[in-house]
Image (tube, grey):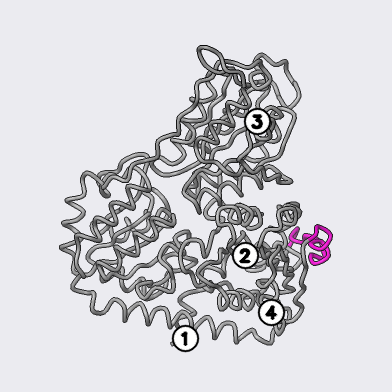
Amino acid sequence: MIETATGRMLAPGHAAIEVLKINGVSVVFGLNGDHILRLYDGLADLGGITPVTVKHENNAALAAEAYGRLTGRPGVALVTAGPGALNSISGVASAMASGAPLVSLSGAVPNGAARETFHGVDEVDFTERAFTPVTKSSRRVTQASEIATALGDAFALAVAGRPGPTHVEITRDVLEGDPFESVRPEPTPLPSATIAPDLDRALERIRAARHPVVVAGKGAWYPRASAALVDFAEALEAPVCHTWEGHGAMPTVHPLALGPFRVMETHPAVLGELQAADLIIGVGVRVGTEPFVALREDYAERLLVLDAADVRSPEHGPRIDSVPSLVATLRALAGAVRPSPSAASARRTCAEAQRSLARGLAVEMDRYAGTRPWHIGLAIAALSERLTPEMVVTSDVSNVKLWVPFQLRTFGPHSHVQAGSWGTMGYALPAALGAAFACPGQKIVALAGDASFLMSSSDVVTLAQHRLPVVVGVHHDGRIGMIDYMQTAAGRQPFATQVGEVDYTKLAEAAGVKGIRVDDPSGIGAAWDRALAEEGPVLIEFMAGHAFPRPSPRRFVEQGA
């Protein structure tokens, strides 16, 4: 940097990193490359930001997604142009689906580049256009003077309304250009925690309700929103059920937690409460999503939505412009309502719903206790028994995905960070990587099937590099178990589902991670205890099967009666 009479002469890459620093970024997940060397020069020269070098760009985006969801601040993925950027795009789309604040920063081919230039195709703006449908904004920077504004806007938009990803690409010729006169950037203002301005009608409906029920969706999952949801539910003394992606928004250990809504199926007690309700309050239920459509079709005139949104839907609820505004609105409601007339029975109803589900799950596990290969649910149940309020659990798209929402008790959103509706296989490991930096010092557990784990397994090395307190549990059945099950259920022989045999314990040890193999369920508890006691990363290989009936809340409740 060169100080001048009128300002500062700053290298373009340094100017970009300065914006990250002023916005509180302390870690970036990325993979260095030819087109972004000057950005990494900025990271090295300015200091203060830890670069976490992943081994595949999609893992950078997924780690940044989990980081953003857990902290409420944009996670940052830094990747090179062309294949680097496009390798990360699925993770960026995952952030769009989950509502995670994320800034995707990539290099780009130069302005006026020839066809088939390195990392390019025929059109120089192809990556900007590719990211447009899966982000809140995608912007190509072609002048150094635009860097600060473009990145500042990206940080602001990522946390405005419904949080989500933004993408900024800076062309190579700009990054490698001469130092330019740069004004010191200002921190991007965060959304204000304003109470919904048109809350009177909603408050009137809530006060008038004799039997309110709350449905917690993914928009209630953010840690601060979750805490406010608990306050609101306690003030109203209303039962709270949760959607699949709302698992953890209302801690399942809370006495007002009722059970799952449309998670495979709906808990019979939840159905009963929804049918009896005269007001259904969808906290974090996004308008237009599958849970919203189901609630509107069955309970249209009784539905009230409280959710942070980019576009207002006044017919469904008050205007809430950000997650901080959702938090403020829930807290305002909590201070303005009293226990409803049905409050006397709410906790009793929830307690019985929790007991019936737990009893049914226990019967289910006992039914297969002697089966070999054994049920992966035995390993999940053992983890749940050992789960503490400080631990973070991430889960992947696999048979694990089906059982964790029923078996894993939650103390808050961090207890279960899942891939969600985008269904990103290979999610659990990079999400655990992001969680380890979002929640330093806390124990992180990543649960994955072997097919999913193989998609992101290269970053076991990254766990070892940083000596992160992550325990990776791999369900080893040698196949894409969910697809194998679907084909079998359709009356077909499983086809193209084998993923090959790998010794995951040895794979972990080759990367510098302690490996533990569990062949028999009698060793599950000891394996968890040993792994959770370690300071550094550990991988547990669970040699479990896959050919078991899928979870069914209705079946669990019936057999637990």
Q: Nearer the viewer, mark 3 or mark 1?
A: 3
| Inter-mark Cα distance, 3 to 1 | 60 Å
Residue under label 1, please give it.
560
Q: Name the quarter where the N terminus is drawn.
A: top right
Main secondary structure along the magenta-highlighted residues: loop
Where is mark 4, residue-wise? 524
**For marks 2 and 1 on the same chain, the one whose residue lies earlier in the sequence:** 2
Q: Which residue is mark 2?
A: 445
Going from the N terminus, do you reach mark 1 or mark 4 first? 4
- The Cα atoms of the two marked residues, 2 and 1, are separated by 29 Å
Q: Is residue 445 left or right of residue 329?
A: right
Magenta residue check for 292: no
* Disc 2 to disc 4, C-alpha distance: 15 Å
Q: Quadrant of residue 554?
A: bottom left
The spot of residue 313 in percent (x, y) is: 30, 43
Task: Choose the circle earlier in sequence order: 2 or 4.
Answer: 2
Q: Nearer the viewer, residue 29 or 382?
A: 29
Q: Is residue 47 left or right of residue 356?
A: right
Disc 3: which residue: 42
Residue type indicated by callout 2: Val
Q: Residue at x 59, y 17 (%)?
A: 9
